[in-house]
Image (cartoon, rainbow, N blue to C red):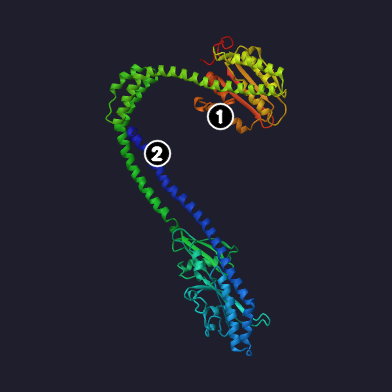
Amino acid sequence: MFYSLRNRLFIIFTILLTVPFLVLSILIPAWFSSVIEDQTKDSTVEMMEQFSIYINSVTSQAEDLGKQVLVNQATQDWLHAESDSAVSSDERMLIKNQLKMQLSSMMINNSNGMDISVFLNDGTGTWGDNPNLSETDWYKAFSKDEKRWISHHQDPYQLHQAMREMEVNSYLIPLFDMQMLDLSGIIKVSFPASLLETALGKIKLGDNGRVYLLDEDGKNVLSGKVETPASVLKDSLLNIERMNQSNGLIETAYRGKDYLVFFQKLKIGNWTLFSEITTSELFAEIDRLQKKLFFFSGVIFLLTILASYVLSSNIVRPLGKLTNAMKFVENGDLEGARSFMPTIKSYNHEVGYAIKVFDHTVEKLNELIKTEYEANLRRKDAEYKALLLQINPHFLNNTLEVIGSLALQNKQKEVLDVSIFLGRMMRYSLNTKTDIVRLGEELAYIRDFIEIVRLRYDGAVSFIIEEDPAAASFPICKFIIQPLVENAVKYSLIQKTEAEILIRTEWKDNELTILIEDDGIGMSKEMASKLLAEEKEYETVLDSGGSSIGLRNVIGRLKLFCGSRFSISIQSEEGAGTSIALCIKGNEGDIHDEGYIGGR
């Protein structure tokens, strides 16, 4: 019972579907978690570094403004006027207005909308007097703890009404007489806290991560409550303080939750950019995905049981009988297959249709085999003709160019010689009685072709022909040597003024070898491998559109007529030349039978 088809299908489907899906339900979430964690770390660190650059830009601008105000002559004049009792109130008012104009000009030219206020120690200010200056929190922090950078607060003593109503952060710089160096007050450069809050809001840590800008006491520099558990915040800040690095990641745990804490130390006011998220929040979507995958694994398991039953009852049994009928066909017994077909019954429409079609196929098989065989012979011949037609126009065009060039030079004898050689070649080409010639005839044709090449290049190309007499009667396709010789000449003269081409034939161990070797530029190993790969993958030439001339042409024709008896090897080195060997294994009678090659 265990080995029944239904049970085997159940086991196979379980192994192929349920088990992999169950394994993926575990592996995919784990892999996603790893990827998400790495991406979160990289993206968070990158965004925090960008925020650090931005806040440095804003705070540097605030520092520059404060220093400009300090050294400005209008500021120093106002400071002197306020401390000198000999200066009249009208003069003081005029000097103060001049200072206000300077401050307004600086604020207008500022791109971040910063507001500048100047106060004396007694609370006298540019935009309003603050008699309780010494009691304000930000002034106390500056006086006692020398805090130059102030966290979010509201300041009613500023020029712009909008700035008075919003939360601001400020940079404080002592106001002193540049000559006497007496501390006389304070310069306060304020900028909207929203500048930093907007930039801070662009730092995304998952969907629920929390990001803060903290001062050295762990308090939020910007508005809003720090929602990170106090224990996690305290432990993290202690670890950050002990660490020498300016940024990094701290992993900590609190009440069964694992926290990822990213930090970036800022040079401004000992501030720290602090962001944290729990791993459960970070991987919440992954957990939900895993639960869904487990659920689908169970559904697939149930569907596997149902599918194994349906397949074994309605599909597998008739297909098994159909396989038995196919064995008759495999053995060539078509009549036995047809007599067995009526025993196959199926209530499945698709399987029944397949059985019907197979029965019809068996009936038509003999007729189709004969028809296809004849069609293949015709197609093979058409492909050869298509390849052959690529050669004749090619060499004829080149030869006519040679004749034209010699005629322009008034070389009548050479024109006559070329015409004689061309005439011999044309007689050879126009002989359509057979496409198969003996190797000796092909070499005679090549010798005429070589004479034309020598005249064309004015003796710059020398040829060596080593002909094996034993191979002279071997039957081959026309025009398989000429394209290779043309290529050899072409690539030998690219970088050189002279070239030497070797043509060798050899009959040995019932195999003909035709070797064409040059001393040209050669080719890379990658190019040679590509040409050999194309030779292995060659199927048809009719699809080429007649654009393949040269080595591909030769390979295509030899593949058509010789089939598996043909092979090619290419030995080449860049700058040292190329050697191409065409190898054709002989059949019985090849050396004596002129009209036979490759079973044509």
Q: Could you tell me if residue 133 is visible in this image? A: yes
Vertical comparison of 187 with 57: above or below: below
Q: Is disc 2 placed on a helix, strand or loop? A: helix
- Residue located beneath label 2 in the image: 16
- Tell me the crowding category of disc 2: few under 14, some 14 to 19, or many 20 or more residues within 10 angstroms, Cα based: few
Q: Position of residue 494 (x, y in %)?
A: 68, 30
- Residue located beneath label 1 in the image: 533
Instruction: Tell me which amino acid carries mark 2.
Output: Leu
Q: Position of residue 242 (x, y in %)?
A: 58, 66
Q: Position of residue 263 (x, y in %)?
A: 54, 63
Vertical comparison of 305 with 354: above or below: below
Instruction: Tell me which amino acid carries mark 1.
Output: Ala
Q: Quadrant of the N terminus?
A: top left
Q: Residue at x 59, y 69 (%)?
A: 61
Q: Could you tell me if residue 501 is visible in this image? A: no
First along the sequence among labels 1 and 2:
2
Q: Is disc 1 placed on a helix, strand or loop? A: helix
Q: Nearer the viewer, mark 1 or mark 2?
A: 1
Q: Quadrant of residue 470?
A: top right
